[in-house]
Amino acid sequence: MVSAPLAVADAGPGDKERLRLWIRMLRTTRIVEAELRERLKREFDSTLPRFDVMSALYREREGMLMSDLSRFLLVSNGNVTGIIDRLVADGYVTRTKREGDKRTSVVRLTPAGMGAFKKMAAAHESWIAELLGGVDTFEVHRLSEMLHAFRSNWEGEH
Amino acid sequence: MVSAPLAVADAGPGDKERLRLWIRMLRTTRIVEAELRERLKREFDSTLPRFDVMSALYREREGMLMSDLSRFLLVSNGNVTGIIDRLVADGYVTRTKREGDKRTSVVRLTPAGMGAFKKMAAAHESWIAELLGGVDTFEVHRLSEMLHAFRSNWEGEH
DNA sequence: CCTATATATTTCAAGCCTAAAATATCTGGG
DNA sequence: CCCAGATATTTTAGGCTTGAAATATATAGG
């Protein structure tokens, strides 16, 4: 789902260029994402959202609240509920009610979840290395810093 | 849905950097996409997928086949069917059976669809100008060229 | 103590998305 | 002409996604 700048009214110089940049960024991430999704499905019978959740839980060994997860992953609460439901059903994750605050529950990776994640993470990293292999190492740094600056700037304002 | 490089086995130098770049790219596009989605919903009661489809049809005034659309937008056939169904129900798009090949139908924007799209496209371009306004004009060019090169390279191999 | 408001989570309806199966039609050899 | 394989599209099952409503619990002010 991505096209290119169109012949519509233009308000400022550089607007068209920014639009072009945005479209290219979107297209690039979609191409890479599609490839990752397909490989995760084929080789691990998993999905990108599951991978992202497991990745967050892997770094927070002590567990996270549902709201921590949705905030960190930039997705809605309701969304996380469904993904965790399925991970629990697969035995990769546990939900533990807390003494003290009965509204919340702590979500943690099980040993099986850890094992499954480690295998996927290794493959994932090598896939990215392969898929972005065409980008020069120097450029990788540069691009990375630019995106980091953009995001810091964004988050500073929101 | 995005995290950061993790402490897992590393195969080559630069792998971690490429992983970091990927994560940042994903996070950036998601932040911008979420903002666009929200604004399209709020101001035009529409969605990004609908916008993308209308955008493709706007540039192809004579219409497109369903398969053209799904190829161009990088989404599955079945997906396009549903989106077009809803656009037809809203009177923004028509499906015309073709003499000669009864399997295919040509999808076109109606005058109402054109009008609605032009309004959205103008707003969309200004939103992008605003959201990516923090990126220096020189950098915009540079980044855009890099992504273009990446994609050409990718498509050359696939 | 009680209640209004805030917080954490789940549920819900609707739309998006994919891969695979089902339909329908077309085309080229026999 | 016939039919096997190719092509175009829709349907289906299952998962992802959101925003809003529903539940449940917590907390602070009166």
Image: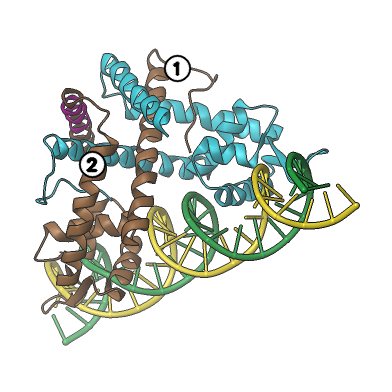
Chain colours: A cyan, B brown, C yellow, D green
Residue found at x 39% / y 12%: B13
Image quadrant where residue B158 sits: top left
**Chain ID, mark 1:** B
Foreground mark, 1 or 2? 2
Residue position for label 2: A23
Residue position for label 1: B11
- Give coordinates of residue D5: x percent, y percent: 26, 63
Magenta segment, prevailing SS (helix, strand or loop): helix
Is A137 above or below relative to C25?
above
Is residue B156 magenta-colored? no
In the image, the segment drawn in magenta is B140-148
- Give coordinates of residue A95: x percent, y percent: 72, 42
Image quadrant where residue C15 sits: bottom left
Residue found at x 46% / y 44%: A42
**Chain ID, mark 2:** A
Disc 1 and disc 2: Cα gap in Å?
32 Å
- Give coordinates of residue B153: x percent, y percent: 20, 31
Question: Which kind of residue does numbered mark 1 sit on?
Answer: Ala
Q: Secondary structure at mark 1?
A: loop
